[in-house]
Amino acid sequence: MALNRRHAALAAALAGTLMFTACGSGSSDAPEIEDSSAEFGFHDTGLPIVDKKLDLTFSGSKTALAPDFNTMTVVKNWEKDTNVHINWENLPETVFQEKKNLILAGGDLPDAFFNSGLTDSEIATYATSGTLIPLEGLVEKNAPNLSKLLNERPDIKAAITSSDGHIYSLPSIEELGLVQFPNQLIVNTAWLKKLDIPMPKTVDEFHDALKAFKEKDASGTGKTIPLSFMPGSWCADIVDLIAALGGIPDNADHRIVQDGKVIYTPTQEGYKKAIQTLHTWYKEGLIDPESFSQDDKAYLAKGKAAKENLGSFVWWETPEMVGADRAKDYAIVPVLEGVDGQRIASQSNNQEIARGAFAITNVNKYPAATIRWADHLYDPVESAQANWGPIGETLKKDEKTGLLTQIPVKEGESEGERRQKVAPSGPKANTAENFKTVVAPEPRAAERQKVVNEFYKPFAGNEGYPAVPLSNDELQEISTVETDAASLVEQKVAKWIVTGGIEDEWDEYVAQLQSVGVDRMVEVYQTALDRYKSNS
Protein backbone atom coordinates (compact mmCIF):
# COMPACT_ATOMS: atom_id res chain seq x y z
CA MET A 1 0.00 0.00 0.00
CA ALA A 2 1.60 3.25 -1.10
CA LEU A 3 1.70 6.28 1.14
CA ASN A 4 0.26 8.59 -1.49
CA ARG A 5 -3.05 7.30 -0.14
CA ARG A 6 -4.36 7.72 3.36
CA HIS A 7 -2.97 5.21 5.85
CA ALA A 8 -5.40 2.46 6.76
CA ALA A 9 -5.71 1.35 10.38
CA LEU A 10 -5.36 -2.37 10.88
CA ALA A 11 -6.68 -4.25 13.86
CA ALA A 12 -4.13 -4.63 16.59
CA ALA A 13 -6.21 -5.23 19.65
CA LEU A 14 -3.50 -6.07 22.14
CA ALA A 15 -1.04 -3.30 21.35
CA GLY A 16 -3.41 -0.70 19.93
CA THR A 17 -0.96 -0.47 17.04
CA LEU A 18 -1.44 1.12 13.61
CA MET A 19 0.45 -0.33 10.66
CA PHE A 20 1.82 1.90 7.89
CA THR A 21 3.51 0.88 4.67
CA ALA A 22 6.55 2.90 3.66
CA CYS A 23 7.44 2.86 0.01
CA GLY A 24 10.89 3.76 -1.25
CA SER A 25 10.40 4.99 -4.81
CA GLY A 26 7.11 3.12 -4.94
CA SER A 27 8.72 -0.24 -4.05
CA SER A 28 6.03 -2.84 -3.44
CA ASP A 29 8.22 -4.85 -1.06
CA ALA A 30 9.04 -1.95 1.29
CA PRO A 31 8.89 -2.90 4.99
CA GLU A 32 5.81 -2.09 7.05
CA ILE A 33 6.28 0.52 9.78
CA GLU A 34 4.47 0.03 13.05
CA ASP A 35 2.86 3.06 14.66
CA SER A 36 2.48 2.62 18.39
CA SER A 37 1.45 6.19 19.17
CA ALA A 38 -1.83 4.88 20.59
CA GLU A 39 0.10 3.27 23.45
CA PHE A 40 0.89 6.77 24.72
CA GLY A 41 -2.66 8.08 24.51
CA PHE A 42 -2.32 9.66 21.07
CA HIS A 43 -4.71 12.49 20.11
CA ASP A 44 -5.58 13.17 16.47
CA THR A 45 -6.09 16.88 17.21
CA GLY A 46 -5.34 19.42 19.88
CA LEU A 47 -2.64 19.52 22.53
CA PRO A 48 -1.00 17.65 24.11
CA ILE A 49 -0.24 15.20 21.33
CA VAL A 50 -0.01 12.26 23.77
CA ASP A 51 -1.21 11.71 27.34
CA LYS A 52 1.90 9.80 28.47
CA LYS A 53 5.25 11.51 27.85
CA LEU A 54 6.83 10.16 24.67
CA ASP A 55 10.60 10.17 24.15
CA LEU A 56 11.98 10.54 20.61
CA THR A 57 15.57 10.82 19.38
CA PHE A 58 16.43 13.42 16.74
CA SER A 59 19.75 13.80 14.94
CA GLY A 60 20.93 16.87 13.05
CA SER A 61 23.03 19.98 13.16
CA LYS A 62 23.17 23.05 15.37
CA THR A 63 24.95 26.37 15.02
CA ALA A 64 28.25 27.14 16.70
CA LEU A 65 26.69 29.27 19.45
CA ALA A 66 23.66 27.08 20.13
CA PRO A 67 23.44 25.52 23.61
CA ASP A 68 21.79 22.18 24.42
CA PHE A 69 18.40 22.57 22.71
CA ASN A 70 16.57 21.33 25.80
CA THR A 71 17.79 24.44 27.68
CA MET A 72 16.12 26.74 25.14
CA THR A 73 12.84 28.32 26.24
CA VAL A 74 11.26 27.59 22.85
CA VAL A 75 12.06 23.87 23.08
CA LYS A 76 10.88 23.70 26.71
CA ASN A 77 7.58 25.21 25.57
CA TRP A 78 7.25 22.68 22.76
CA GLU A 79 7.67 19.82 25.24
CA LYS A 80 5.14 21.38 27.62
CA ASP A 81 2.63 21.84 24.78
CA THR A 82 3.03 18.42 23.16
CA ASN A 83 4.15 16.11 26.01
CA VAL A 84 6.85 14.84 23.64
CA HIS A 85 10.45 14.93 24.90
CA ILE A 86 13.25 15.05 22.36
CA ASN A 87 16.65 13.48 22.99
CA TRP A 88 18.81 15.73 20.83
CA GLU A 89 21.80 14.16 19.12
CA ASN A 90 22.70 17.32 17.24
CA LEU A 91 26.26 18.15 16.28
CA PRO A 92 28.00 21.33 15.10
CA GLU A 93 27.15 21.81 11.44
CA THR A 94 30.58 20.96 10.00
CA VAL A 95 30.83 17.82 12.17
CA PHE A 96 27.31 16.69 11.29
CA GLN A 97 27.95 17.09 7.57
CA GLU A 98 30.97 14.80 7.90
CA LYS A 99 29.07 12.15 9.89
CA LYS A 100 25.63 12.40 8.28
CA ASN A 101 26.07 9.59 5.77
CA LEU A 102 27.59 7.33 8.43
CA ILE A 103 24.50 7.92 10.58
CA LEU A 104 22.17 7.28 7.65
CA ALA A 105 23.98 4.13 6.55
CA GLY A 106 24.61 2.82 10.07
CA GLY A 107 22.46 0.60 12.22
CA ASP A 108 21.73 3.17 14.93
CA LEU A 109 19.29 5.52 13.26
CA PRO A 110 17.46 8.31 15.11
CA ASP A 111 13.68 8.54 14.98
CA ALA A 112 13.97 11.65 12.82
CA PHE A 113 16.39 14.16 11.36
CA PHE A 114 16.01 17.80 12.42
CA ASN A 115 18.04 20.57 10.75
CA SER A 116 19.52 17.80 8.65
CA GLY A 117 20.39 19.71 5.51
CA LEU A 118 19.70 16.51 3.59
CA THR A 119 20.72 16.98 -0.02
CA ASP A 120 18.55 15.89 -2.94
CA SER A 121 20.97 13.04 -3.59
CA GLU A 122 20.81 11.86 0.03
CA ILE A 123 17.02 12.07 0.09
CA ALA A 124 16.79 10.07 -3.14
CA THR A 125 19.33 7.48 -2.01
CA TYR A 126 17.90 6.84 1.44
CA ALA A 127 14.30 7.01 0.30
CA THR A 128 15.06 4.30 -2.27
CA SER A 129 16.66 2.15 0.42
CA GLY A 130 13.66 2.67 2.71
CA THR A 131 15.69 4.45 5.41
CA LEU A 132 13.52 7.56 5.03
CA ILE A 133 9.78 6.95 4.93
CA PRO A 134 7.26 8.78 2.72
CA LEU A 135 5.37 11.44 4.63
CA GLU A 136 2.52 12.65 2.45
CA GLY A 137 -0.05 10.27 3.98
CA LEU A 138 1.00 11.26 7.48
CA VAL A 139 0.85 14.93 6.52
CA GLU A 140 -2.62 14.56 5.06
CA LYS A 141 -3.96 12.80 8.15
CA ASN A 142 -1.96 14.29 11.03
CA ALA A 143 -0.48 17.64 9.99
CA PRO A 144 -3.24 20.25 9.56
CA ASN A 145 -0.92 23.29 9.60
CA LEU A 146 1.34 21.90 6.89
CA SER A 147 -1.58 20.45 4.90
CA LYS A 148 -3.21 23.87 4.81
CA LEU A 149 0.03 25.46 3.63
CA LEU A 150 0.58 22.89 0.88
CA ASN A 151 -2.99 23.29 -0.34
CA GLU A 152 -2.60 27.07 -0.49
CA ARG A 153 0.91 26.96 -1.96
CA PRO A 154 1.27 24.28 -4.65
CA ASP A 155 4.74 25.66 -5.40
CA ILE A 156 5.88 24.60 -1.92
CA LYS A 157 4.30 21.19 -2.36
CA ALA A 158 6.05 20.80 -5.71
CA ALA A 159 9.37 21.84 -4.15
CA ILE A 160 9.27 19.03 -1.57
CA THR A 161 7.73 16.32 -3.77
CA SER A 162 10.27 13.88 -5.18
CA SER A 163 10.13 12.67 -8.75
CA ASP A 164 8.42 9.43 -7.60
CA GLY A 165 5.53 11.48 -6.21
CA HIS A 166 6.39 11.02 -2.55
CA ILE A 167 7.39 13.56 0.10
CA TYR A 168 10.37 12.38 2.16
CA SER A 169 11.39 15.60 3.91
CA LEU A 170 9.66 18.70 5.22
CA PRO A 171 10.60 22.29 4.36
CA SER A 172 12.10 25.25 6.15
CA ILE A 173 10.74 28.47 4.65
CA GLU A 174 11.79 32.09 5.09
CA GLU A 175 10.37 34.31 2.36
CA LEU A 176 11.97 37.67 2.89
CA GLY A 177 13.06 38.11 -0.72
CA LEU A 178 16.69 38.73 0.28
CA VAL A 179 18.73 35.82 -1.03
CA GLN A 180 17.96 36.28 -4.73
CA PHE A 181 20.20 39.36 -5.12
CA PRO A 182 23.15 38.95 -2.72
CA ASN A 183 25.90 40.34 -4.98
CA GLN A 184 25.75 44.05 -4.21
CA LEU A 185 28.29 46.23 -6.00
CA ILE A 186 29.58 48.82 -3.52
CA VAL A 187 31.71 51.90 -4.21
CA ASN A 188 33.70 54.28 -2.00
CA THR A 189 31.62 57.47 -2.16
CA ALA A 190 34.15 59.37 -0.06
CA TRP A 191 36.63 58.86 -2.88
CA LEU A 192 34.05 59.80 -5.50
CA LYS A 193 33.47 63.07 -3.63
CA LYS A 194 37.19 63.64 -3.17
CA LEU A 195 37.80 63.25 -6.91
CA ASP A 196 34.61 65.12 -7.89
CA ILE A 197 33.09 62.07 -9.61
CA PRO A 198 29.30 61.53 -9.58
CA MET A 199 27.83 58.14 -8.71
CA PRO A 200 28.31 56.02 -11.86
CA LYS A 201 25.16 55.25 -13.82
CA THR A 202 26.70 53.36 -16.74
CA VAL A 203 29.31 50.62 -16.84
CA ASP A 204 31.65 52.99 -18.71
CA GLU A 205 31.30 55.59 -15.95
CA PHE A 206 32.04 52.91 -13.37
CA HIS A 207 35.16 51.92 -15.31
CA ASP A 208 36.29 55.54 -15.43
CA ALA A 209 35.75 55.92 -11.67
CA LEU A 210 37.91 52.87 -10.99
CA LYS A 211 40.56 54.23 -13.32
CA ALA A 212 40.57 57.55 -11.46
CA PHE A 213 40.92 55.69 -8.13
CA LYS A 214 43.98 53.93 -9.56
CA GLU A 215 45.69 56.76 -11.39
CA LYS A 216 45.15 59.34 -8.63
CA ASP A 217 45.89 56.87 -5.83
CA ALA A 218 42.69 57.76 -4.02
CA SER A 219 43.81 56.02 -0.82
CA GLY A 220 47.11 57.91 -0.68
CA THR A 221 48.87 54.67 0.19
CA GLY A 222 50.34 53.75 -3.16
CA LYS A 223 48.37 50.52 -2.78
CA THR A 224 44.90 51.58 -3.87
CA ILE A 225 42.65 48.64 -4.83
CA PRO A 226 40.06 49.89 -7.34
CA LEU A 227 37.94 46.68 -7.42
CA SER A 228 38.06 43.38 -5.55
CA PHE A 229 35.73 40.38 -5.69
CA MET A 230 35.60 36.56 -5.45
CA PRO A 231 34.33 34.62 -8.49
CA GLY A 232 31.98 31.80 -7.54
CA SER A 233 31.14 33.25 -4.14
CA TRP A 234 27.46 33.31 -3.20
CA CYS A 235 27.66 37.05 -2.47
CA ALA A 236 30.96 38.43 -3.79
CA ASP A 237 30.77 37.73 -7.52
CA ILE A 238 30.69 40.27 -10.35
CA VAL A 239 27.59 38.80 -11.99
CA ASP A 240 26.04 42.23 -12.54
CA LEU A 241 29.20 43.52 -14.22
CA ILE A 242 29.08 40.52 -16.54
CA ALA A 243 25.44 41.40 -17.26
CA ALA A 244 26.35 45.03 -17.97
CA LEU A 245 29.34 44.19 -20.16
CA GLY A 246 27.84 41.23 -22.02
CA GLY A 247 24.06 41.52 -21.71
CA ILE A 248 23.80 38.07 -20.10
CA PRO A 249 22.79 37.66 -16.43
CA ASP A 250 24.84 35.21 -14.41
CA ASN A 251 24.93 33.55 -10.99
CA ALA A 252 27.17 31.24 -8.97
CA ASP A 253 25.67 28.14 -10.65
CA HIS A 254 25.99 29.71 -14.13
CA ARG A 255 22.43 28.38 -14.57
CA ILE A 256 19.70 30.91 -15.25
CA VAL A 257 16.13 30.77 -16.50
CA GLN A 258 14.76 33.21 -19.07
CA ASP A 259 11.21 32.86 -20.41
CA GLY A 260 11.05 29.35 -18.98
CA LYS A 261 14.24 28.25 -20.74
CA VAL A 262 17.29 26.98 -18.84
CA ILE A 263 20.52 28.60 -20.03
CA TYR A 264 24.12 27.73 -19.14
CA THR A 265 25.75 31.16 -19.17
CA PRO A 266 29.48 30.37 -19.73
CA THR A 267 28.79 29.21 -23.29
CA GLN A 268 26.98 32.39 -24.33
CA GLU A 269 28.57 35.01 -26.61
CA GLY A 270 27.65 37.77 -24.17
CA TYR A 271 29.65 36.01 -21.46
CA LYS A 272 32.65 35.90 -23.78
CA LYS A 273 32.32 39.63 -24.49
CA ALA A 274 32.18 40.45 -20.77
CA ILE A 275 35.34 38.45 -20.00
CA GLN A 276 37.16 40.15 -22.87
CA THR A 277 36.38 43.57 -21.39
CA LEU A 278 37.34 42.50 -17.88
CA HIS A 279 40.75 41.47 -19.21
CA THR A 280 41.19 45.04 -20.44
CA TRP A 281 40.26 46.31 -16.97
CA TYR A 282 42.81 43.93 -15.45
CA LYS A 283 45.58 45.17 -17.74
CA GLU A 284 44.74 48.70 -16.61
CA GLY A 285 45.30 47.66 -12.99
CA LEU A 286 41.67 48.09 -11.98
CA ILE A 287 41.10 44.54 -10.67
CA ASP A 288 42.69 43.19 -7.50
CA PRO A 289 45.06 40.36 -8.58
CA GLU A 290 44.13 38.45 -5.43
CA SER A 291 40.47 38.32 -6.54
CA PHE A 292 41.03 34.83 -7.96
CA SER A 293 42.79 33.32 -4.95
CA GLN A 294 41.51 34.98 -1.77
CA ASP A 295 39.14 33.39 0.72
CA ASP A 296 36.46 35.11 2.80
CA LYS A 297 38.86 35.93 5.62
CA ALA A 298 41.39 37.63 3.37
CA TYR A 299 38.68 39.37 1.39
CA LEU A 300 36.90 40.82 4.42
CA ALA A 301 40.24 41.93 5.86
CA LYS A 302 40.73 44.24 2.86
CA GLY A 303 37.71 46.28 3.88
CA LYS A 304 38.98 46.67 7.41
CA ALA A 305 42.64 47.46 6.65
CA ALA A 306 44.19 50.07 8.94
CA LYS A 307 44.31 52.51 6.01
CA GLU A 308 41.20 52.61 3.84
CA ASN A 309 42.42 51.48 0.43
CA LEU A 310 39.45 49.66 -1.14
CA GLY A 311 37.58 51.51 -3.87
CA SER A 312 34.88 49.03 -4.81
CA PHE A 313 33.83 45.50 -3.90
CA VAL A 314 30.93 43.07 -4.06
CA TRP A 315 29.27 41.81 -0.87
CA TRP A 316 25.78 41.39 0.56
CA GLU A 317 26.12 43.85 3.42
CA THR A 318 28.44 46.87 3.59
CA PRO A 319 29.12 46.99 7.37
CA GLU A 320 30.18 43.35 7.38
CA MET A 321 32.80 44.10 4.73
CA VAL A 322 34.23 47.41 5.93
CA GLY A 323 32.98 47.74 9.52
CA ALA A 324 30.20 49.90 10.95
CA ASP A 325 32.33 53.05 11.32
CA ARG A 326 33.65 52.97 7.75
CA ALA A 327 30.33 51.98 6.15
CA LYS A 328 29.30 55.64 5.83
CA ASP A 329 32.05 56.06 3.21
CA TYR A 330 30.44 53.47 0.90
CA ALA A 331 27.17 53.11 -1.02
CA ILE A 332 25.51 50.66 -3.38
CA VAL A 333 26.10 51.31 -7.06
CA PRO A 334 22.70 51.28 -8.81
CA VAL A 335 22.38 48.57 -11.48
CA LEU A 336 24.57 49.93 -14.25
CA GLU A 337 23.40 50.74 -17.74
CA GLY A 338 25.39 48.51 -20.05
CA VAL A 339 25.03 46.79 -23.41
CA ASP A 340 22.36 48.44 -25.58
CA GLY A 341 21.48 50.74 -22.68
CA GLN A 342 20.07 47.86 -20.63
CA ARG A 343 20.10 47.69 -16.83
CA ILE A 344 20.25 44.03 -15.84
CA ALA A 345 20.28 42.60 -12.32
CA SER A 346 21.39 38.97 -12.09
CA GLN A 347 19.19 36.75 -9.96
CA SER A 348 20.76 33.89 -8.01
CA ASN A 349 19.37 30.41 -7.43
CA ASN A 350 19.49 30.75 -3.64
CA GLN A 351 16.32 29.22 -2.23
CA GLU A 352 13.80 30.44 0.32
CA ILE A 353 12.13 27.03 0.35
CA ALA A 354 14.67 24.54 1.67
CA ARG A 355 14.11 20.79 1.64
CA GLY A 356 15.61 18.50 4.24
CA ALA A 357 14.54 20.34 7.40
CA PHE A 358 12.85 17.26 8.87
CA ALA A 359 12.66 13.59 7.87
CA ILE A 360 11.42 10.45 9.64
CA THR A 361 13.34 7.18 9.55
CA ASN A 362 12.09 3.62 9.31
CA VAL A 363 13.03 2.81 12.93
CA ASN A 364 10.50 5.32 14.28
CA LYS A 365 7.67 3.46 16.04
CA TYR A 366 5.58 6.62 16.46
CA PRO A 367 5.40 8.36 13.05
CA ALA A 368 1.89 9.76 13.66
CA ALA A 369 2.94 11.46 16.90
CA THR A 370 6.22 12.56 15.32
CA ILE A 371 4.57 14.24 12.34
CA ARG A 372 2.11 15.96 14.69
CA TRP A 373 5.09 17.25 16.70
CA ALA A 374 6.69 18.64 13.52
CA ASP A 375 3.37 20.10 12.39
CA HIS A 376 3.14 22.07 15.64
CA LEU A 377 6.17 24.04 14.42
CA TYR A 378 4.27 25.03 11.24
CA ASP A 379 1.82 27.03 13.32
CA PRO A 380 2.77 30.60 12.23
CA VAL A 381 3.55 31.82 15.76
CA GLU A 382 5.65 28.72 16.49
CA SER A 383 7.48 29.14 13.18
CA ALA A 384 8.40 32.69 14.17
CA GLN A 385 9.76 31.51 17.52
CA ALA A 386 11.67 28.62 15.89
CA ASN A 387 13.40 31.23 13.73
CA TRP A 388 14.00 34.12 16.15
CA GLY A 389 13.41 32.88 19.68
CA PRO A 390 10.66 33.02 22.30
CA ILE A 391 8.01 35.63 22.86
CA GLY A 392 8.99 37.61 25.92
CA GLU A 393 12.73 37.12 25.44
CA THR A 394 13.47 38.03 21.83
CA LEU A 395 10.01 38.76 20.40
CA LYS A 396 7.16 40.95 21.59
CA LYS A 397 3.79 41.88 20.11
CA ASP A 398 3.57 45.40 18.76
CA GLU A 399 0.43 47.06 20.14
CA LYS A 400 -0.25 49.03 16.95
CA THR A 401 0.35 46.42 14.26
CA GLY A 402 -0.26 43.22 16.22
CA LEU A 403 2.92 41.81 14.68
CA LEU A 404 5.65 40.07 16.63
CA THR A 405 8.71 42.33 16.59
CA GLN A 406 12.31 42.03 17.72
CA ILE A 407 13.25 43.04 21.24
CA PRO A 408 16.51 45.04 20.86
CA VAL A 409 19.67 43.02 21.51
CA LYS A 410 21.95 43.72 24.43
CA GLU A 411 24.94 45.96 23.86
CA GLY A 412 27.85 44.03 22.41
CA GLU A 413 25.65 41.30 20.90
CA SER A 414 24.38 41.11 17.34
CA GLU A 415 20.94 39.91 16.24
CA GLY A 416 22.59 37.02 14.44
CA GLU A 417 24.50 35.89 17.53
CA ARG A 418 21.41 36.05 19.74
CA ARG A 419 19.36 34.14 17.22
CA GLN A 420 21.79 31.20 17.31
CA LYS A 421 21.49 30.99 21.11
CA VAL A 422 17.70 31.04 21.40
CA ALA A 423 16.19 29.69 18.16
CA PRO A 424 16.58 26.02 17.13
CA SER A 425 15.29 26.51 13.54
CA GLY A 426 14.09 23.21 12.02
CA PRO A 427 10.83 22.69 10.09
CA LYS A 428 8.99 26.01 9.88
CA ALA A 429 7.15 28.31 7.50
CA ASN A 430 7.76 32.03 7.72
CA THR A 431 6.05 32.89 4.46
CA ALA A 432 5.77 36.24 2.74
CA GLU A 433 2.17 36.39 3.95
CA ASN A 434 3.19 35.69 7.56
CA PHE A 435 5.65 38.59 7.43
CA LYS A 436 2.62 40.80 6.84
CA THR A 437 0.29 39.25 9.41
CA VAL A 438 2.34 37.44 12.09
CA VAL A 439 5.95 38.56 12.49
CA ALA A 440 7.88 41.60 11.30
CA PRO A 441 11.30 41.11 9.69
CA GLU A 442 14.38 41.81 11.79
CA PRO A 443 15.45 45.47 11.44
CA ARG A 444 18.53 44.48 9.42
CA ALA A 445 16.39 42.26 7.19
CA ALA A 446 13.87 45.06 6.67
CA GLU A 447 16.69 47.33 5.52
CA ARG A 448 17.92 44.71 3.06
CA GLN A 449 14.38 44.25 1.76
CA LYS A 450 14.27 47.96 0.92
CA VAL A 451 17.59 47.68 -0.90
CA VAL A 452 16.50 44.64 -2.92
CA ASN A 453 13.14 46.17 -3.83
CA GLU A 454 14.66 49.52 -4.81
CA PHE A 455 17.91 48.55 -6.49
CA TYR A 456 17.52 45.05 -7.93
CA LYS A 457 14.06 43.55 -8.39
CA PRO A 458 12.89 46.14 -10.95
CA PHE A 459 15.84 45.17 -13.18
CA ALA A 460 15.85 41.38 -12.78
CA GLY A 461 17.18 39.97 -16.04
CA ASN A 462 16.39 36.34 -15.31
CA GLU A 463 14.44 34.03 -13.07
CA GLY A 464 16.23 31.99 -10.46
CA TYR A 465 16.11 28.23 -10.95
CA PRO A 466 13.47 27.21 -8.39
CA ALA A 467 13.66 24.55 -5.68
CA VAL A 468 13.27 21.67 -8.12
CA PRO A 469 13.80 18.16 -6.70
CA LEU A 470 15.78 16.01 -9.13
CA SER A 471 15.43 12.25 -9.26
CA ASN A 472 18.26 9.98 -8.19
CA ASP A 473 18.91 9.04 -11.83
CA GLU A 474 19.04 12.70 -12.85
CA LEU A 475 21.40 13.56 -10.01
CA GLN A 476 23.71 10.68 -10.87
CA GLU A 477 23.73 11.67 -14.52
CA ILE A 478 24.71 15.30 -14.03
CA SER A 479 26.70 15.45 -10.79
CA THR A 480 30.08 14.72 -12.40
CA VAL A 481 29.25 16.86 -15.42
CA GLU A 482 28.39 19.83 -13.23
CA THR A 483 31.58 19.48 -11.19
CA ASP A 484 33.83 19.13 -14.22
CA ALA A 485 32.17 22.01 -16.06
CA ALA A 486 32.37 24.35 -13.06
CA SER A 487 36.06 23.55 -12.61
CA LEU A 488 36.83 24.25 -16.27
CA VAL A 489 34.89 27.54 -16.25
CA GLU A 490 36.61 28.70 -13.06
CA GLN A 491 40.07 27.97 -14.45
CA LYS A 492 39.46 29.52 -17.85
CA VAL A 493 37.75 32.68 -16.61
CA ALA A 494 40.57 33.44 -14.17
CA LYS A 495 43.16 32.83 -16.88
CA TRP A 496 41.35 34.90 -19.50
CA ILE A 497 40.78 37.89 -17.20
CA VAL A 498 44.40 37.87 -16.02
CA THR A 499 46.36 36.90 -19.16
CA GLY A 500 43.80 37.10 -21.99
CA GLY A 501 43.48 34.67 -24.88
CA ILE A 502 39.73 34.11 -24.85
CA GLU A 503 39.42 35.00 -28.55
CA ASP A 504 41.75 32.18 -29.60
CA GLU A 505 40.54 29.58 -27.12
CA TRP A 506 36.78 30.17 -27.02
CA ASP A 507 35.65 27.63 -29.63
CA GLU A 508 37.83 24.88 -28.17
CA TYR A 509 36.57 25.72 -24.66
CA VAL A 510 32.90 25.52 -25.71
CA ALA A 511 33.59 22.20 -27.44
CA GLN A 512 35.26 20.92 -24.28
CA LEU A 513 32.24 21.89 -22.18
CA GLN A 514 30.00 20.10 -24.66
CA SER A 515 32.20 17.02 -24.52
CA VAL A 516 31.83 16.75 -20.73
CA GLY A 517 28.05 16.89 -21.20
CA VAL A 518 26.79 20.42 -20.48
CA ASP A 519 24.16 20.21 -23.21
CA ARG A 520 22.71 17.08 -21.61
CA MET A 521 22.98 18.74 -18.17
CA VAL A 522 20.86 21.64 -19.41
CA GLU A 523 18.32 19.17 -20.83
CA VAL A 524 18.06 17.42 -17.45
CA TYR A 525 17.52 20.70 -15.63
CA GLN A 526 14.95 21.75 -18.24
CA THR A 527 13.04 18.47 -17.89
CA ALA A 528 13.05 18.79 -14.10
CA LEU A 529 11.90 22.41 -14.32
CA ASP A 530 9.03 21.51 -16.65
CA ARG A 531 8.01 18.69 -14.31
CA TYR A 532 8.12 21.05 -11.32
CA LYS A 533 5.92 23.58 -13.12
CA SER A 534 3.37 20.92 -14.03
CA ASN A 535 3.26 19.82 -10.36
CA SER A 536 2.81 23.42 -9.24
Image (tube, helix red, strand yellow):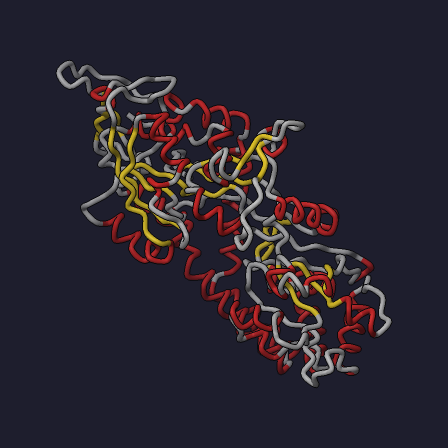
Q: Position of residue 35 (x, y in %)?
A: 23, 25
Residue 508 in sight: no
Q: Residue at x 30, y 38 (%)?
A: 112
User: Which quadrant does the N terminus fall into?
Assistant: top left
Q: Nearer the viewer, residue 73 or 433?
A: 73
Residue 498 in sight: yes
User: Which quadrant does the C terminus fall into?
Assistant: top right
Q: From this viewpoint, which residue is outermost toward the front?
A: 411
Q: Nearer the viewer, residue 267 or 287?
A: 287
Viewed as shown, does residue 529 lie left or right of 132?
A: right
Total marks shown come to: 0
Q: Quadrant of residue 422?
A: top left
Q: From this viewpoint, which residue is outermost toward the left?
A: 14
Q: Is residue 92 above or below residue 434?
A: below
Viewed as shown, does residue 166 lie left or right of 432?
A: left
Q: Position of residue 86 (x, y in %)?
A: 29, 36
Q: Is residue 101 above or below residue 289?
A: above
Q: Quadrant of residue 438?
A: top right
Q: Position of residue 466 (x, y in %)?
A: 55, 44
Q: Position of residue 340 (x, y in %)?
A: 81, 60
Q: Is residue 163 above or below residue 375?
A: below
Q: Nearer the viewer, residue 47 or 14?
A: 47
Q: Nearer the viewer, residue 140 or 373?
A: 373
Viewed as shown, does residue 476 lie left or right of 514?
A: left
Q: Residue at x 64, y 64 (%)?
A: 314
Q: Residue at x 29, y 21 (%)?
A: 50
